[in-house]
Amino acid sequence: MTAMTALLAGLLFGIGLMVSGMANPAKVLGFLDLAGTWDPSLAFVMVGAIAIGSLAFLIAKHRKRSFLGLPMQLPASTTVTLRLVLGSAAFGVGWGLAGFCPGPALVALGAGYPKAIGFVAAMVAGMVVFEVAERGKSRMQRA
């Protein structure tokens, strides 16, 4: 049941990204180009997503279990760290250069955008480098 729910949620999310234009790098770059021909349409998508997400977190905060009966797992930390700021900056730079962020990049890959292949490959490589670095850091701390 959990896997089917995740599949359906992912499909709905992907369809929403396609319909909103978030999987189209040209549309995203038009939104990010404040000095050129700015396309504000994605701002409405973001405002809608923030409103729905805020409502979902408000409801989830008061629950012990999800609607599927699983334990509720919410972020425990609210601390802004240098690591968080640097990660956010790297995300923003990547988004601005490529016009993709991870979710829309996977949708664009499935939709056949050639540019998504390079982005997803770089994204996976970055995840691998991060995981290797974290494991090395963990081993050094135990030694």
Image (cartoon, rainbow, N blue to C red):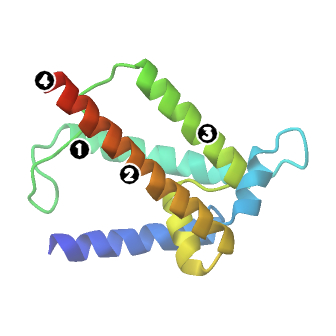
- Density class for disc 1 (Cα within 10 Å; few <14, some 14-19, many ≥20) is some
Q: What residue type is labelled 3?
A: Gly
- Give whichever of discs 3 and 4 has the lower sequence position: 3
The residue that mark 4 highlights is: 143
Please report contact status of discs 2 and 3: CB closer than 8 Å, yes or no. Answer: no
Q: Nearer the viewer, mark 1 or mark 4?
A: 4
Q: Is residue 67 left or right of residue 24?
A: left
- Give whichever of discs 3 and 1 has the lower sequence position: 1
- In whole angstroms, how far apart are the C-alphas of marks 4 and 2? 23 Å
Q: What residue type is labelled 1?
A: Ala
Residue at 27% in and 30% down: 137
Please report contact status of discs 3 and 1: CB closer than 8 Å, yes or no. Answer: no
Q: Can residue 61 be seen in this view?
A: yes
Q: Which of marks 3 and 1 is in front?
A: 3
Please report contact status of discs 3 and 4: CB closer than 8 Å, yes or no. Answer: no
- In whole angstroms, how far apart are the C-alphas of marks 1 and 2? 31 Å
Q: Is mark 4 on a helix, strand or loop?
A: loop
The residue that mark 3 highlights is: 92
